[in-house]
Image: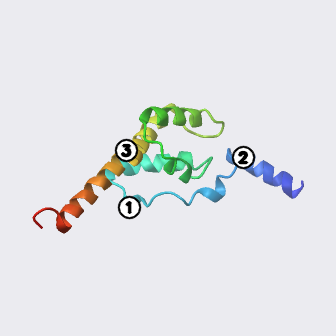
Amino acid sequence: MTRAARLVLLLGLTGCAGAVSERRDGLDVSTLPADVQGDYALFSQRCSKCHSLARPLQSGITEDSYWRMYVEKMRRQPGSGISEADTVPILRFLHWYSVDRPKAAAAAAAAAAADAGGPGG
């Protein structure tokens, strides 16, 4: 068997091409809220099988309806390993990441700015 044939076979067995080299781009779990950590763990396990985690994390998507379509499309991909039950925690994490996390960061920044020299300071 040629080297190229072995590589094709190996990629076929992993389910999705590119998965091996792109798994190190996720988040530090210790920085996540406790109620998000389990959802992130499932998201990172399932979604890194086929593409880098940067792909969804840096997508700029902020609408839950679009996330639902995106995750359903990924779920139907051969070898994704995403079950229907997996979609709930994955979507919950993606909502937190794209909607709740930026709101919390903006509120924290506004509070810090007010403490640093807001009116009357």
The Cα–Cα distance between marks 3 and 1, rounded to whole angstroms, is 20 Å
Q: Position of residue 31 (x, y in %)?
A: 37, 60
Give the residue at x 19% y 61%: 114
Amino acid type assigned to the residue bearing label 1 in the image:
Ser
Labelled disc at residue 110: none
Q: Nearer the viewer, mark 1 or mark 2?
A: 1
Q: Along the polypeptide, which appears first: circle 3 or circle 2?
A: 2
**Which quadrant is home to the C terminus?**
bottom left
Amino acid type assigned to the residue bearing label 3 in the image:
Val
User: Which residue extends farthest front?
Assistant: 119
Amino acid type assigned to the residue bearing label 2 in the image:
Leu
The Cα–Cα distance between marks 1 and 2, rounded to whole angstroms, is 32 Å
Q: Is residue 42 above or below residue 120?
A: above
Give the residue at x 46% y 58%: 27
Labelled disc at residue 99: 3
Q: Is residue 111 left or right of residue 12?
A: left
Q: Is disc 3 surrounded by few (<14), some (14 to 19) or many (20+) residues within 10 Å?
A: some
Q: Position of residue 3 (x, y in %)?
A: 86, 58
The Cα–Cα distance between marks 3 and 2, rounded to whole angstroms, is 35 Å
Closer to the camera in the image, 81 or 64? 64
Q: Is disc 2 surrounded by few (<14), some (14 to 19) or many (20+) residues within 10 Å?
A: few
Q: Nearer the viewer, mark 3 or mark 1?
A: 3
Residue wearing tag 2: 13
Residues marked 3 and 2 touching at CB (< 8 Å): no
- Dot 2: what SS? helix
Residue wearing tag 1: 30
Q: Along the polypeptide, which appears first: circle 3 or circle 1?
A: 1
Give the residue at x 65% y 56%: 20
